[in-house]
Amino acid sequence: MTDVRRQMAWLSNTVVLGIVCCVLFAWVANAGGALKVHTARPLLKAHVARTLILREVGHLHLTSKRGFVLNEQGTVSGTISGTLYIHLRLVSSSRVIAELNIYPHGGSLSGSGTSGYQVRGAFANFSGYLAVTRGTGSYSRAHASSLKFTGSIQRRNDSVTVQLSGPLSV
Amino acid sequence: MLGVCTAASANAAETVALHTSFSPEKLGASTTIAFGFDIAESEGGLPSPLRSVSLSLPAGLNYLDTTLGLAICQPAALLARGLAGCSPNSRLGFGSAFVEVPFGQGAGHEIPHIDALMGPPHGHNTVVLFYADGREPVYAQIIFAGELVAGTERFGGSLNAGVPLIPSVPAGPPVSIVRVRTTIGPAHLTYYERRHGHTVAFHPVGVSLPSRCPRGGFKFLAQFAFQDTTRVTATSTVSCPHRR
């Protein structure tokens, strides 16, 4: 009886050990496979473009004026907010070229465009479209081709109010 | 300083001498542009009535600086109430004219006051209203508009004005304009604004001359069209200011 018990115990231990080995082998094999997959395919961080609909209003004051150029600085608020710089260059009595730089939190946006220009009493109004062609930081992939750009210059002190609207891809 | 004037005519019916000047004539500074013309008939008779003038201004004039025309004068208000119908801040300049009537002794008559005012813009173009309040021999208020149109590289823009026929007497033949002198600029103009609850007078800033004089001076060119279909082109150049 004693021998029989010993044999049963050995058999039981062997079976348990075998199961444990199988489980360990399977885990190691799976772990190795998973590791193998990760090392074969480097991690890719995909950029998903999204579109912001800008509805910006900016209020600026004159910082300098040279020849046909007004340099303005102010703040913009709306979909994004931050510091706004605009250079307005009068190219004829009825057209103006606008260059714009916005510095929202975490980056910047730059764009330019041509607008019609109309003197109307105390104000000179401009209206046209501009394209955003460059960006940095969070806006490094920013682009827009036809943002509506309107505004007015108070002729007595050259302060400027602008509106910027349209889709911006970031 | 008066510019050198020349005139050329398509069929020698009318001749025109164009006069232009800047005051002050200082590069990079605000100025008043004075322009005028004398019209004659080559045979010594009465020139045909003027129907339009197109004055091309020199390139480089800076329209960004000017605070001329801070208010808009509505033609209907001008007709109804004369100059009192428009804000002083709409005045751009002033001048005079000399007309001849096609009857009587042939003597000329002066229209002593012509005013230039800022009108409602047409499209993107600035509109200048010319207003004359005729007393004798022409008892009529005359308003006509000039439109400042963007120019080319050589000329900075042109002021294009259609001139109405000015009746000498009701249902009579029109008068002939033989001389016009006028200014566009801040000289002798006073504007007003509200500041801290008070009305304060100030002088507007005119169009600025460029900081460099163009080669050969500031060139003006004017085209005149007359009722007898004659077209005349006249040029005038304001010399570069002397270096000090």
Image: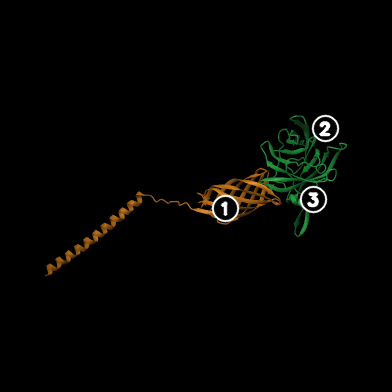
Chain colours: A orange, B green
Q: Residues within 10 Å of mark 1 (few under 14, many from 20)?
A: some
Q: CA distance from mark 3 to mark 2?
A: 34 Å
Expressed as whole percent of the image width and height from the top left, the position of residue B223 reads 73, 35
Residue A165 shows which numbered tag? 1
Of tags 3 and 2, the one toward the viewer is: 2
Say which of B15 and A148 sits in front. Answer: B15
Q: Which residue is mark 3?
A: B82
Give the chain letter at badge 3: B
Residue B45 shows which numbered tag? 2
**Which image quadrant for residue A80?**
bottom right
The reply to whether residue B80 is visible in this rendering is yes
**Which image quadrant for residue B49?**
top right
The reply to whether residue B209 is visible in this rendering is no
B208, above or below A78, in the image: above
| Residue type, label 3 | Gly
B147, above or below B42, in the image: below
Mark 2 or mark 3, which is nearer the start of the sequence? 2
The residue that appears at 71% across and 43% down in the rendered structure is B147
